[in-house]
Image (spheres, rainbow, N blue to C red):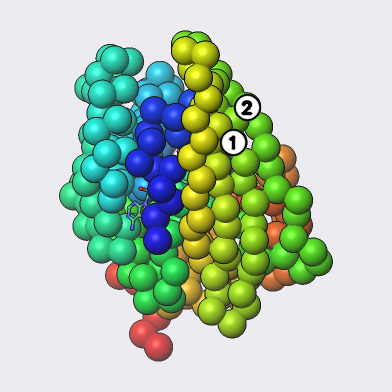
């Protein structure tokens, strides 16, 4: 089930309005290190309110973002118009499961565990296939996700962001992780302060619970990618890519598009 907080894009956009420059710097280093040609055209599945769509054109990229939620997408389009970067950005209403996005992209990325909205193995494989088909051979798909915890669950996060006199305090916590169904049950809330009033919005949602063995298996089943590298929260390369757990926080998995036409016949 989608988060109810996605129905409040103006508050979502404030809650997640932290500076993206370090993350974008990491994307640019990954493009240089892993892609054998210059990266210009980027695809962002599940683009949300357009945080990255508004930022990446300043670095000369052309970017296409898509999302399944028309309310969020409309917010993204309005904010792109206000930021005057529509020329380098295209937005589409589409579902990650089947999104067949025209145009050959050099790279793609999906941020803050948005891929977790795909729960079943079949949906994930279908998404990886569709994304692979949109990419040039040698291009990369940077997938930002987190794995099941090995010890206890973390206490949860709480932070406050403010813009134009509107303050949004956000809480996020994992309630339970179910290894059998591979689902992570989570709660989130926004407390919004504006014009001297306080409103609170609460939500429960469910995301895919990732195990590193499932990641290896589903990437292999997609037939489109191989895992080129995995980086931690501080953008450091992780050496032990077989043994990944939630204690690492959100990690960046670099999937490289295979030369599908020249794969050996099994
Ligand atoms: C956590 S938000 C992140 C948005 C954006 N990536 C960001 O970093 O701000 C997850 C997004 O995934 C979108 N989403 C969920 N399921 C989807 C699907 N099946 N296809 C496309 N987008 C989806 C939601 O509408 C929401 O905008």
Which residue is farthest bottom? 266
State the residue in front, 38 or 201.
201
Residue 160: which disc?
2
Residue at 77% in and 68% down = 150
> Along the polypeptide, which appears first: circle 1 or circle 2?
2
Residue on which disc 1 sits: 170
Give left or right: position of 24 versus 135.
right
The C terminus, quarter of image: bottom left
Q: Is residue 16 left or right of residue 231?
A: left
Residue 17 shows in this picture? no
Q: Residue 62: percent from the left, percent from the top?
A: 31, 31
Q: Which mark is residue 194?
A: none
Given residues 166 and 39, the one toward you in this image is 166
Which quarter of the image is occupied by the N terminus?
bottom left
Please provide percent x and percent y for residue 104.
25, 48
Is 195 situated left or right of 231 in this image? left
Instruction: Check contact, mark 1 vs mark 2: CB within 8 A.
Output: yes
Q: Nearer the viewer, residue 20 or 4?
A: 4
Seen from the viewer's position, the closer of residues 77 and 266 is: 77
Give the answer, above or below, for where 160 lies relative to 216: above
Residue 70, placed above or below residue 249:
above
Which picture quadrant has residue 52?
top left
Asked if residue 199 is positioned above or below residue 260 in the image, the reply reads: above
């Amino acid at each position: 089930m989608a988060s109810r907080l996605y129905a409040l894009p103006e508050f979502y956009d404030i809650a997640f309005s932290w500076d993206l420059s370090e993350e974008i710097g990491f994307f640019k280093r990954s493009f240089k290190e892993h892609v054998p040609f210059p990266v210009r055209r980027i695809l962002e599945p599940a683009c949300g309110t357009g945080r990255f769509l508004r930022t990446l054109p300043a670095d000369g990229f052309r970017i296409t973002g898509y999302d399944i939620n028309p309310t969020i997408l409309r917010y993204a389009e309005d904010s792109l118009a206000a930021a005057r970067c529509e020329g380098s950005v295209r937005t589409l209403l589409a579902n990650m499961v089947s999104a067949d996005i025209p145009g050959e992209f050099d790279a793609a990325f999906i941020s803050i565990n948005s891929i977790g909205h795909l729960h079943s193995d079949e949906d994930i494989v279908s998404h990886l296939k569709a994304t692979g088909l949109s990419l040039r051979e040698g291009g990369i798909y940077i997938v930002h996700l987190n794995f099941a915890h090995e010890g206890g669950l973390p206490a949860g996060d709480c932070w406050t962001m403010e813009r134009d006199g509107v303050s949004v305090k956000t809480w996020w916590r994992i309630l339970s992780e179910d290894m059998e169904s591979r689902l992570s049950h989570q709660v989130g809330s926004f407390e919004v302060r504006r014009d001297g009033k306080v409103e609170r919005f609460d939500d429960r949602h469910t995301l895919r619970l990732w195990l590193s063995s499932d990641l290896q298996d589903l990437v292999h089943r997609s037939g489109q990618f191989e895992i080129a590298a995995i980086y931690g929260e501080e953008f450091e390369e992780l050496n032990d890519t077989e043994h990944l757990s939630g204690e690492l926080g959100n990690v960046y998995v670099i999937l490289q598009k295979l030369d599908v036409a020249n794969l050996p016949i099994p």
